[in-house]
Amino acid sequence: MIKKILGGLLGVVILGAIGLWAFWPKGLVVNGPLLDFLTGRQAETPTADVMRDRFKLPEGFRIGIFASGINNARTLAVTATGDVLVTSMRPGEIVLLHRDENGDGAADGRNVIASGLDWPHSVALHGGYLYVAETTQIVRGLFDAETRELGALEPVFGGMPPGGNHRTRSIGFDPYGAMYVTVGSSCNVCIEEEPYRATMLKMNADGTDMQTYATGLRNSVGFDWRPETGGLYATDNGRDLLGDDTPHCELNLVQEGSDYGWPWAYDDQQPDPDFGTSNPEKVAASKPLLHGFGAHTAPLGIRFFDPDTAPAGYAGAALVALHGSWNRSELAGYKVVSVHFDGDTVQQRDFLTGFELDEDVIGRPVEMAFGPDGAIYISDDYAGVVYKVGFGDIAVPGFSVEEKQVTDPLADLDAMTIAELSATGVGLYGEYGCASCHDPEAAAEGVQVKELQALASRYSIDDLKGLFAAPPGPMPAFEFSDMEAQALAVYLLSEFGN
């Protein structure tokens, strides 16, 4: 009997392999953790050694784990009290991560504030409510940030199509209080019968007065408004099965009534081979992409920096999470990039890399959110982690105050070197008017003074040099040479160290 069962199973496997070979779509290349994504398997939480060896950030930034063990952690929202909300999509839960109050940089606790939800992907806070985007509906409940309590959830907008290739829904509110919802396509490329598919919808906060805001968006998972201009920018995932390098995944400036091409066109009005060549009028009417992230990089969340807390060089810029490819012979994406705007030109730079190294994947970034102090939170649905990226004096796990108190930051310098560097540093301190923000006697009336105290317990020389390179708002940025930065750091640590 056992032999018959095993023989039958072997026959099924062989027939399945033959069928897969016979019907394998042309151009379909599978590479990356696709099977883990389909089954929901989570990667291991990165250790401190792995993070140190793998993750790379611009100078002045550092990263640690704010919270781990969050199954399929997707989108984020920061509450008025600094707690972090994260959707645990596959289990159908909303997890509230308690703000760091003990100074170690990590979440002080957590609790599940909603459960039993249908694929909850996106959350938003607006008008005293917490909004949750499920696959077929948007629900909301009264939320008290102080008590961390969520009231009963009630439907606000329904009727969105279930299933299909793209079943996540994203929500956001513009500065005037209108709610926007994106609904992805049901397929790789096809003519949709369901009117909500591949669109961005706009409606009132209570779900009334719904209208289709934009079309031709195959799967726009992330969108945000640029503070300086009010422009609405959205990421979009390009189609598969056209090779390793075609088409781009997109960044679009979304305007009301515009069509962004899918399924007729891609990139800069390039006709799609399935539907575009026979519909040239649709191709011509499509809106070209603003910026291309490369094929199959899978851009998801996009968040613009808050101008009041952005580090130097990032005011006006946004972060984009590239979730990573599966339909490409060589992996692409698997990182967080920054996008910088200069008129109609968009420049892309690496921000956080190391999720993928030599085809080995340890994580897949999904979305970013910013704390009231400027801290950057990044969700990773593959490792089930929310990372915290800090700069300046923002506490980050693994870089705690207690660890830095055990050593003297000037211990490696002799007294003469400290004196020489401090002499240069005090000159820079005066030349750049540092006292006007840090000395109560020198500050102008109305200026909020941040006195410099106990710096040696919180900073090393390299920490301060990094802070100068990427200062938190409203601290101004100065173009110090490495020698000048070294001298100013030594002066500050010797003068204000204790």
Image (spheres, rainbow, N blue to C red):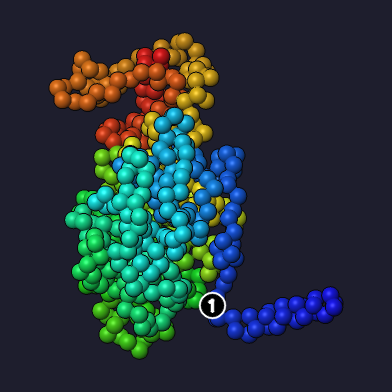
In the image, residue 218 sits, relative to residue 424, either above or below, namely below
* 110, 279: nearer the viewer: 110
Q: Is residue 71 above or below residue 37?
A: above
Q: How many marks?
A: 1
Quadrant the C terminus occupies: top left
Question: What residue appears at the point 70 percent right and 83 percent down from the top-left corner?
Answer: 15
Residue drawn at 33 percent across, 36 percent down: 373
Q: Residue furthest left?
A: 445
The image position of residue 336, as x and y in percent, is 43, 52
Q: On screen, 454 above or below 220? A: above
| Residue density around tag 1, few if under 14, some if 14–19, many if 20 or more, within 10 Å | few
Q: Quadrant of residue 217?
A: bottom left
Residue at the extreme top of the image, as rendered: 415
Residue 305: x, y in percent? Answer: 31, 46
| Quadrant of residue 186 within the rendered picture | bottom left
Helix, strand or loop under label 1:
loop
Task: Give the amino acid type for the residue marked by disc 1 in the picture.
Answer: Gly
Nearer to the camera, 330 or 212: 212
**Residue 296 in the figure: left or right of residue 422:** right
Q: Nearer the viewer, residue 216 or 170?
A: 170
User: Percent position (x, y) of residue 382?
Assistant: 54, 55
Residue at the outermost front position: 152
Residue drawn at 38 percent across, 69 percent down: 136
Q: Residue at x 31, y 78 (%)?
A: 195
Q: Is residue 259 left or right of residue 186?
A: left
> Would residue 63 be visible to someone looking at this image?
no
Quarter the N terminus occupies? bottom right
Q: Which residue is mark 1?
A: 27
Does residue 227 appear in the picture of this structure? yes
Residue 169: give x, y in percent of width and height.
38, 65
